[in-house]
Every structure is written in structure tokens, then in C-alpha cells.
Image: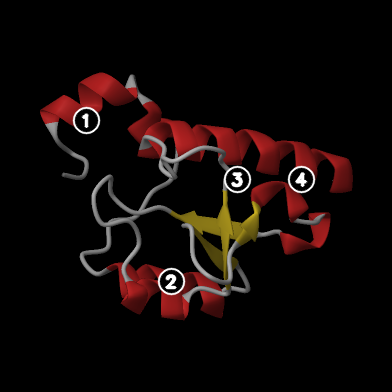
Amino acid sequence: PHPPKKEILKTALGATESVSWEYFKNPKEVIKKMKSEGVKVCALELTSKSYPYYDLKGDVFPLCVLIGNEITGVSQELLDLCDFAIEIPQYGIKQSLNVAVAYGVTIFELRKIFDKKH
């Protein structure tokens, strides 16, 4: 779902009015638009080429972080369009986190990296 929707408006607590947003039916369109505007696009996904989120440097911004869903993650088709992939290193058998938690951890760290540069 996307705004305007009653459920989203209630949860967003007015953010849909103060934060600019755009709806795209096809995620490939968003990636292409971001890249055309000079924004790097990375996937938050464990791949054979992904590296730890904390290894990012300040020159990576502006940056769009693409996250997948709980079950299938980011599709290979979208991964192929991304500039790179980052991961949250984990220990033990289970190599997965809830999407909201993973995004929160990553964005918190990216904000620290951004603040050091700017």
C-alpha cells in the first residue's frame, strides 16, 4: 500500500505531509531515477559480493538503500541494478533479521558515517 491510505496515514502520524515521497509501481524505475540523479543505490542483502555496512565511507552519499521483504529479500533482477550490496554481519546459524530491525540498524550506522563527513 501507499499513501493516501487510512492505515498509512494513521501510522505515519503526519509524516506523509512533511516528508516528500513518490510512488513507483515498478522498483526498477526508482533505481534508474536515483542513479540518473547521481544517487548511489545499494541493497541491504547478504550476497557473495556484499560487505559489512560499517565499511562504508563518507563519500558514498547520496545513497539509496534498497530493502527486500521478509521471505525473498531483494530479487536478483534488482540486485543487478544496484551499485553494491551491504550486509549486517551475524554470528551463529540463523543469518537473517527482521526487515525493520535490519533497516534501523543500518540507517543508524549510515547516519553516523554521514555525520562524520558532513
Q: Which residue appears farthest toward the left when viewing the image?
A: 6
Q: Is residue 32 visible?
A: no
Instruction: Measure the alpha-carbon separation of dots 1 and 3.
Output: 32 Å
Q: Which residue appears farthest toward the front when viewing the image?
A: 93
Residue at label 4? 114
Residue density around tag 2, few if under 14, some if 14–19, many if 20 or more, within 10 Å: many
Instruction: Measure the alpha-carbon separation of dots 2 and 1.
Output: 23 Å
Instruction: Measure the alpha-carbon separation of dots 4 and 2.
Output: 21 Å
Residue 111 figure quarter = top right
Residue at label 2? 31
Q: Is residue 94 above or below residue 79?
A: above
Between circles 4 and 1, the one closer to the viewer is 4
Q: Is residue 9 visible?
A: yes
Instruction: Measure the alpha-carbon separation of dots 3 and 2.
Output: 25 Å
Residue at label 3? 89
Whether the residues at callouts 4 and 1 have beta carbons within 8 Å, the answer is no
Marker count (numbered): 4
